[in-house]
Image (spheres, helix red, strand yellow):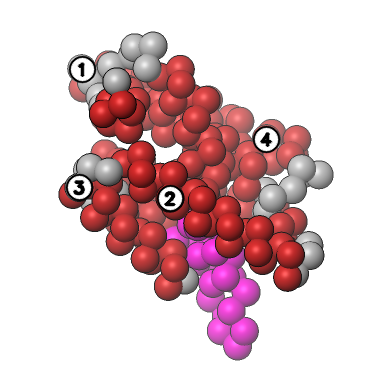
C-alpha cells in the first residue's frame, strides 16, 4: 500500500507539477513490472490471483462491454453539450498505448488496494465500503480536474465490483485505456498524445 501511495504522490509531482509525463509513466511501468516479475518468481500463481488471467476473459468482457458502450455514448453527449469534443488522429495511438498504462493503474487501484483491503486478516470490511474507498482514492489522484475526478470515481466503482467478483485485470485495463482516451478527447477536451509525446515531436 505504501508503494501505491508513493506512486500516486509521484503522479502529482512528476506529471502534474513538473510535466514529466512520459518519463514518469515509463518508470512506473518498469518498476511495477519488475515487482510483478519478482513476486511471480517467489510465489508462483500470484499472477492469476491478482487478475492476470485469461480463463474468464470472455465472461468479464460480457459484463464490461455494455457499461463501456454506455460510457462512450455518455462521453459523446456530454462532450457535444460542453463543446469540448477534440477528436483528432492523435486518439488512435492513445487507444493503442493507453491500455498498457490502464492495466498498471488497475493493478495498483484494484488488485493491490481493493484486493488487499478485501483480504485483510482479522478485519471485515464490506465489499461496498472497499469499492467506495478505492474509488475515492482513484478519483482524488486526478485532483484538481473535476470531470476527471468524477469520471474515474464512477469507473472505479463499477470496476471494483467486477474485479472482486471475477478478478480479471486484462479486460479492466483495456477498457480503462479505451474509455480514458475517449473521455479525454470528448468530455475533457484535452490531447493526451501531445501532453505525453509533445516534447519529442
Vertical placement of 87 versus 170: above or below? above
Q: Circle 3 — which element? A: loop
Vertical placement of 186 versus 21: above or below? above
Q: Which mark is residue 18?
A: 3
- Give whichever of discs 4 and 1 has the lower sequence position: 4
Q: Circle 1 — which element? A: loop
What separation in Å lies between label 1 and label 3 (alpha carbons)?
29 Å
Q: Residue at x 41, y 28 (%)?
A: 181
Residue 26, percent from left and from top? 44, 44
Q: Is residue 117 visible?
A: yes
Q: Nearer the viewer, mark 4 or mark 2?
A: 2
Q: Which mark is residue 61?
A: 4
* Mark 1 touches mark 2? (CB < 8 Å): no
Residue 152: name its quadrant.
Answer: top left
In the rendered structure, which segment of residues is drawn in magenta? 107-134
Which residue, given by chain and number where applicable, does mark 1 sit on? 83
Image quarter where the C terminus lies is top left
Q: Nearer the viewer, mark 1 or mark 3?
A: 3
Residue 11, percent from left and from top? 31, 53
Residue 59, percent from left and from top? 75, 39
- Give whichever of discs 1 and 3 has the lower sequence position: 3
Q: Nearer the viewer, mark 3 or mark 4?
A: 3
Which residue, given by chain and number where applicable, does mark 2 sit on? 27
Q: Which mark is residue 163?
A: none
What separation in Å lies between label 4 and label 1 (alpha carbons)?
31 Å
| Residue 14 on the magenta span | no
Residue 4: name its quadrant.
Answer: bottom left
Q: Is residue 14 left or right of residue 171?
A: left
Q: Residue at x 69, y 34 (%)?
A: 62
Crowdedness of circle 3 by 10 Å Cα count: few (<14), some, many (20+)?
few
Amino acid at each position: 500500500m505504501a508503494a501505491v501511495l508513493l506512486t500516486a504522490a509521484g503522479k502529482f509531482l512528476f506529471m502534474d507539477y513538473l510535466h514529466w509525463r512520459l518519463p514518469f509513466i515509463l518508470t512506473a511501468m518498469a518498476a511495477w513490472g519488475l515487482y510483478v516479475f519478482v513476486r511471480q518468481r517467489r510465489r508462483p500463481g500470484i499472477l492469476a490471483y491478482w487478475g492476470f488471467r485469461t480463463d474468464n476473459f470472455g465472461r468479464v468482457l460480457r459484463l464490461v462491454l455494455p457499461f463501456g458502450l454506455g460510457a462512450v455514448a455518455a462521453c459523446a453527449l456530454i462532450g457535444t453539450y460542453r463543446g469540448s469534443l477534440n477528436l483528432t488522429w492523435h486518439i488512435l495511438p492513445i487507444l493503442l498505448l493507453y491500455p498498457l498504462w490502464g492495466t498498471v493503474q488497475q493493478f495498483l487501484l484494484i488488485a493491490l488496494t481493493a484486493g488487499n483491503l478485501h483480504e485483510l486478516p482479522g478485519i471485515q470490511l464490506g465489499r461496498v465500503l472497499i469499492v467506495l474507498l478505492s474509488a475515492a482514492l482513484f478519483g482524488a489522484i486526478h485532483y484538481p480536474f473535476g470531470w476527471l475526478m468524477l469520471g474515474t470515481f464512477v469507473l472505479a466503482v463499477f470496476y471494483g465490483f467486477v474485479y472482486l467478483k471475477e478478478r480479471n485485470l486484462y479486460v479492466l485495463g483495456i477498457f480503462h485505456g479505451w474509455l480514458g482516451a475517449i473521455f479525454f478527447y470528448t468530455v475533457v477536451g484535452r490531447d493526451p498524445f501531445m501532453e505525453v509525446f509533445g516534447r519529442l515531436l
